[in-house]
Image (tube, rainbow, N blue to C red):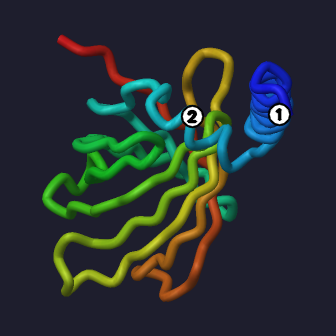
Amino acid sequence: MNSQIIAALIGATATVAASVLAFVLRSNPVIDRLVHLGKYPDWRGRWESNWKYLDDDIEEISVIEIKKQRGGRMYGEFHTKNVPAQVFLFDATYNGRFITSTWRPKDTHIVDYGASFLEIQGDGSFQGYFAEFDWSSNKVRPGRLLVRRLATT
C-alpha cells in the first residue's frame, strides 16, 4: 500500500475517533461534573440561616462559617445566636443548583444531628428543608430554612 494512502487512512481514523470522543465527553454527566469542579463559586465566609420547625412558629437564627471548600464540597461550623457556645460541624455538597448537608455536634456529649436539602435562589440565597433530632423533644423534627451570605466588613 502507498504510504500516502496509509497516512490518509490514519488521519481520517484519528479525525473520526476525535469526533466520537468529543461527542461522548460532551454528553456524559460524569465528565461534565469533572470539568465543572473548578468552576464553583467561592462559598467560604459567614452566612446566616433563618429556620423554624414546621410544627411551631418560633424562628431561630444560626450563624454559619464555611471554612474550607474543595470544588462543590464545603466544610465548616455553625451555632444558633441564642446559644453561641453550642457549636455544630457540617459538611455540604453543591452541584450547581442544590446543596445537601449533614451536621453533628462538636461536643460529643450533645445529641443533635441533622440534614438539609436546599435550592439556590435568584438572589444567591438558598431555601429548603431540614430534618434534625431535637434533643429537647426527643423527636426527629422537620423544618424550613433560608440561608443568606452575610456582608463582609
Residue 100 point in image, percent of width and height: 57, 54
Say whether residue 70 is left or right of residue 35.
Answer: left
Say whether residue 86 is left or right of residue 31.
Answer: left
Residue 71 point in image, percent of width and height: 42, 40
Say whether residue 21 is left or right of residue 130.
Answer: right
Comparing 15 with 115, the one in front is 15
Residue 26 appears in the rendering = no
- In the rendered image, the residue lying farthest to the front is 1
Of badges 2 and 1, the one in the foreground is: 1
Residue 3 point in image, percent of width and height: 76, 26
Above or below, comparing residue 101 to residue 104 in the picture:
above
Residue at disc 1, secondary structure: helix
Residue at disc 2, secondary structure: helix
Three-letter amino acid code at disc 2? Val
Q: Residue at x 66, y 25 (%)?
A: 121
Comparing 87 with 35, the one in front is 35
Q: Which residue is mark 1?
A: 13
Q: Earlier in the sequence, mark 2 or mark 1?
A: 1
Q: Which residue is mark 2?
A: 35
Say whether residue 21 is left or right of residue 112.
Answer: right
Q: Residue at x 83, y 26 (%)?
A: 2
